[in-house]
Image: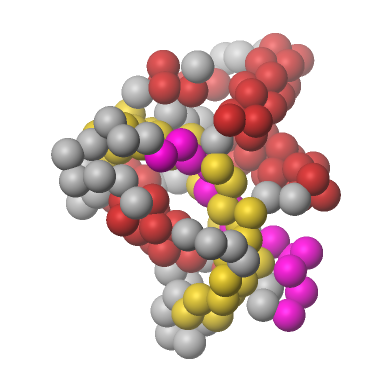
Amino acid sequence: MSLPIEVAIADGVRVCVRGRRPEDEPFIYDSWMKSYRAAAANEGVPGKIYRRNQTDTIGKLLLRAETVVLCDVEHTDHILGYSVSELEPERSVLHWMFVKFSFRRFGLARWMLENITKRTPDDAELYISHLPPNDFIHHMKEQYRLIYDPSTKE
């Protein structure tokens, strides 16, 4: 997919789809860290350890993975959501997907997930490296044949 592009998501919602910019990183780190903190995998992990480990993990993933950013068509610095994934011939990995609360229920997350699955070969596995605390991915696991494997983040 050549970026940036403008796409219609659902119900007339139009967004700009682009790659990650250096100025996006504070938002990506902050939103990922805050939203993943409530995940079951982090229960009982002291805050200092969580911040250190997760900051390191996110940094490594952003260096090697593709980040797709959905933003306002007229204001491309206004991020609505993003996904971080690696697409390989034998497997694809969705590391994290985030949509701002006020833009949920418009199909943005579903579009990002479908974008990843369309670009994943039919015979390849699609993994999730981080399970979020909300139910969206849990509802989508069967439909998209998603496999949870935390070792894919390494």
Q: Main secondary structure of the magenta part?
A: strand
The residue depicted at 43 percent of the width and 28 percent of the height is 129
Query: Magenta span covers which residues?
Result: 74-87
**Colour logic:** secondary structure
The residue depicted at 63 percent of the width and 54 percent of the height is 19
Residue 17: image location, x then y, percent: 58, 65
Q: Is residue 134 above or below residue 86?
A: below
Q: Nearer the viewer, residue 56 or 142?
A: 56
Residue 96: image location, x then y, percent: 51, 40
Which image quadrant for residue 152?
top left
Which image quadrant for residue 80?
bottom right
Q: Is residue 102 above or below residue 50?
A: below
Assess whether residue 15 is covered by the magenta stretch. no
Q: Nearer the viewer, residue 18 or 37?
A: 18
Whether residue 38 is visible? no
Residue 32: image location, x then y, percent: 63, 39
